[in-house]
Image (cartoon, rainbow, N blue to C red):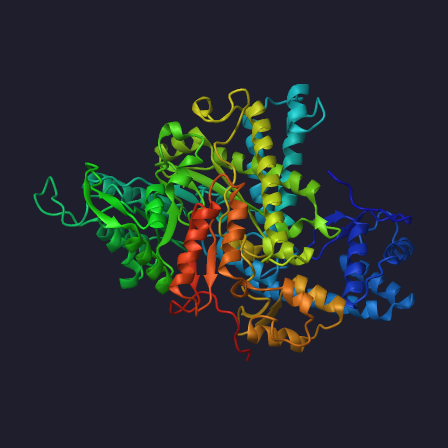
Amino acid sequence: MVPPSESGSAKTSVRRICKRDGSIVPFDRGKIENAISKAVAATGGSDLSQVSHLADLVVEEINKRFHRHSIPAVEEIQDIVENVLIREGHAETAKAYILYRQKRTELREAKKLLLGFVDDSKLSLNGAWIAKERYLLRDKAGVIIESPLQMFRRVAKNVAAVERKYLRSGPIDSRTASLLGVSPGTEVSSYVKQLEEDFFSAMSSLSFVPAGRILANTGTKNGQLANAFVVPVGDSIDTIYDALKEQALIHRAGGGTGFDFSRLRPKGDSASVSGGVAAGPVSFLKLFDESSARIKIGTRRASNMGMLSVHHPDVLDFITLKTRQSLPHFNISVALTDSFMKAVLSNGDYAVRHPSSGEVVKRIKARQVFDLLVTTAWQCGDPGILFIDRINSANPTSYEGPFEGVSACAEMPLYAHESAVLGSINLDKFVKNKGVDWKNLERTVSLAVQFLDNCIDISSYPTAEIEKVTKNFRRIGLGVMGWSDMLFQLGIPYDSERAVKLARKVMKFINDTAASTSERIAKVKGSFPLFKKSAFPQFSRRRNASLTAIAPTGSISMLAETSSGIEPHFALSYVKRVFEGKEFLYVNKHFERVARERGFYSDELVRAIAERGNIQNVDSVPDDVKEVFKVSHQISPEWHVKMQAAFQKYVEGAISKTINFPSGATMGDVFDAYLLAYKEGCKGLTIYRDQSLEGQVLSAGSPIS
């Protein structure tokens, strides 16, 4: 464990302080320096040469007021910082520090009102609200019984304890110790405790955030930790209703499900048992959606992915499905093969086949179908497209056949009855000295892989078959979020070759680190059971059949107050109405820092941005700042696709991302984006044209009351 920072010359006799929630923690001089640095930056200053000296003076004052056995309160330390700044003639910095304390006090009070207790975590008010609504444990009466920090501790403790399953009690032998990164002879109990602290630190600092089912269910009676599942649907009443039952069990446990309806015979085909006619996949998809509406866990709504092959006879009916009805619990996607795409590019036709016999039913112009896909996506955002041959060609366990389907948000290709645990590295936390903090990123990725692999062991499963298949492959989906915030900090425009190049570099680093970690874990715990049949080199080892996938991170990115997945920010400033009619004006922290440093920040500016949705027409903002701080609808679809392709190059699974189009975009624009995605190596694509749906979830720019 890294000791608390005491980089300056003055050493404090005080070793511990009391936080506002009553917990006792080690004194950390580094936090004093950080607070002073932020206050200097808030005044528009850039000279940080006096920060260490001022921190020394604060430490000297602490030594005067408290003896070495004292445990001062954090407010007392902050009072000393404030007094030292004023005494030393740094009036503007002191003012900024006082305002910062005031804001923090307002935040703490708001969080206390929201949660019912003091919360000293790093969560914003928005993050605390997400934790309260989705993840914090409650008693039978519905009363919250843990704080956000206690939530992270609960998860860390239970996940770290899995190590005892693989390690004998007592001292760790030298070979195993070298693989675990500890000293030979370290007691297993000490190693597990240290791992718990490392997991806790990664989560509580919001550097790594596991997916929602892990946060909500770890250490509880439910205990089901996977977000992603795929369920097979066969062409019989028995198999269809088996799938419906499995879907219900998964949804009850909080998971999302993916289905491929391509095996079902087309509408109007003969039904072999009843002598009637088949209803077709679209009809049964409605049944699965209706079932989903009946199951709800807390505030979570059941989520599904319905997929159909472009070669299915009912594909045209499937493509236009969402133009006729909403199906609120389903995303839908059409699986496009390479042969179909070649026919599109050559303006040729392709074969539509009966799903049971494989016989060619008819041949259709591929462009006719592709144009219909483009039209309906332009109209309502659905269906998405999946380049299914590309997905299957990247499968290292293809000896088991093609994947059955993809998860509800399309980030995880999986086999029938397979599940996957998910988690995301928050790239927002890995910028240091105006560059990527590669060392810390490497350590956190390694921790995250071990964490997610342990989750496979500790998780409960809706069925025995799901447990068997999941543990045969041990797939995990480690992704990223906070990409847009990382670019903001680095001063790199999202729509630039610099950003695309960095995306490849960052994702390659993450995937390579994940692979080496998986190999190291396998040397201690063994490779995944079906490793010997896989495409991996047989002289190596591998704990997990696949490691990386980028989920949309809708809720956990709000928990961490950062940009979702690899998406650009949707807005730089907005009003959040949280509770009791109280409004909170949110502004992106990196934009605020730059605005203060450059001297153009004002409350009026923030409110103007919240009403407009962006800064492009705000005269007081310099052009170079406008170039970096663009929001989603200001970035062309071409750059959205290029960014997705850059990450996909080094992602083993797939990526959930939305390509945003302005409301005035044409169907030709969508057509071009689809072809670009295919040519650039994406595994799928989802688009949304602004205002194409009534009641859309996000809308940039809103009047402030």
Q: Is residue 309 left or right of residue 678?
A: left
Report the label total. Answer: 0
View extreme (bottom): residue: 705
Q: Residue 105: in sight, yes or no? A: no
Q: Is residue 464 left or right of residue 511?
A: left
Residue at horizontal 70 percent and vertical 22 percent from the top: 185
Q: Is residue 506 left or right of residue 666?
A: right
Out of 208 and 647, give the one closest to the viewer: 647
Q: Quadrant of the C terminus?
A: bottom right
**Residue 331, image x, y percentages:** 36, 54
Out of 556 and 321, give the one closest to the viewer: 321
Out of 279 and 348, give the one closest to the viewer: 348
**Residue 343, image x, y percentages:** 32, 46
Q: Residue 205: in sight, yes or no? A: yes
**Residue 412, image x, y percentages:** 44, 42
- Seen in the picture, residue 306 relative to 421 is either above or below; the reply is below
Residue at horizontal 39 percent and vertical 67 percent from the top: 692
- Seen in the picture, residue 90 relative to 448 is either above or below; the reply is below
**Residue 86, image x, y percentages:** 88, 68
Q: Is residue 563 left or right of residue 661?
A: right
Q: Quadrant of the N terminus?
A: top right
- Seen in the picture, residue 398 relative to 351 is either above or below; the reply is above
Out of 218 and 206, give the one closest to the viewer: 206
